[in-house]
């Protein structure tokens, strides 16, 4: 199965964003990073999609994962790899 589209709203200076980048790169997956510094107008889009104001906000396919702690929890539970491989996940 194809890897679903991964999007991450982030800033360059955020340590949580860097943690999420490192985790995703370690999985060997490509992701689109939406820089809120370069595109500040997209912050409203992020808030609308996620209901949250903090970065990072990560989406895998249509699913809102949340921030770096949420991504790390998903990985620790063993669900991130399956999700990245396109398996449905109903959590």
Image (spheres, helix red, strand yellow):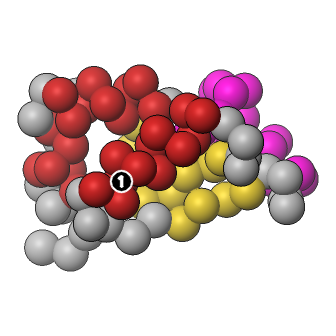
- Give the left or right position of residue 18, taking residue 43 as reference: left
The question of residue 10 being in magenta is answered with no
Numbered disc total: 1
Q: Is residue 53 above or below residue 29?
A: above
Percent position of residue 5, x then y? 40, 66
Looking at the picture, tell me which residue is in the foreground, 80 or 28.
28
Residue at point 15%, 61% (across, down):
85
Q: Which residues are magenta?
A: 40-57
Q: Is residue 51 above or below residue 59?
A: above
SS at badge 1: helix
Residue 64 in view here: no
> Which image quadrant: the N terminus?
bottom left
Residue at point 38%, 26% (across, down):
70
Q: Residues within 10 Å of mark 1 (few under 14, many from 20)?
A: some
- Give the left or right position of residue 12, taking residue 15 as reference: right
Which residue is labeled 1 in the image? 24
> Which image quadrant: the C terminus?
top left
């Amino acid at each position: 199965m194809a890897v679903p589209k991964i999007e991450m709203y982030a800033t360059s200076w955020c340590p949580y964003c860097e943690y999420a980048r490192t985790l995703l790169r370690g999985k060997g997956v490509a992701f689109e990073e939406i820089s809120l510094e370069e595109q500040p107008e997209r912050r409203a889009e992020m808030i609308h999609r996620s209901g949250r104001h903090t970065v990072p906000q990560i989406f895998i396919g249509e699913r809102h994962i949340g921030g770096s702690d949420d991504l790390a929890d998903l990985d620790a539970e063993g669900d991130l790899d399956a999700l990245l491989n396109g398996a449905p996940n109903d959590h």
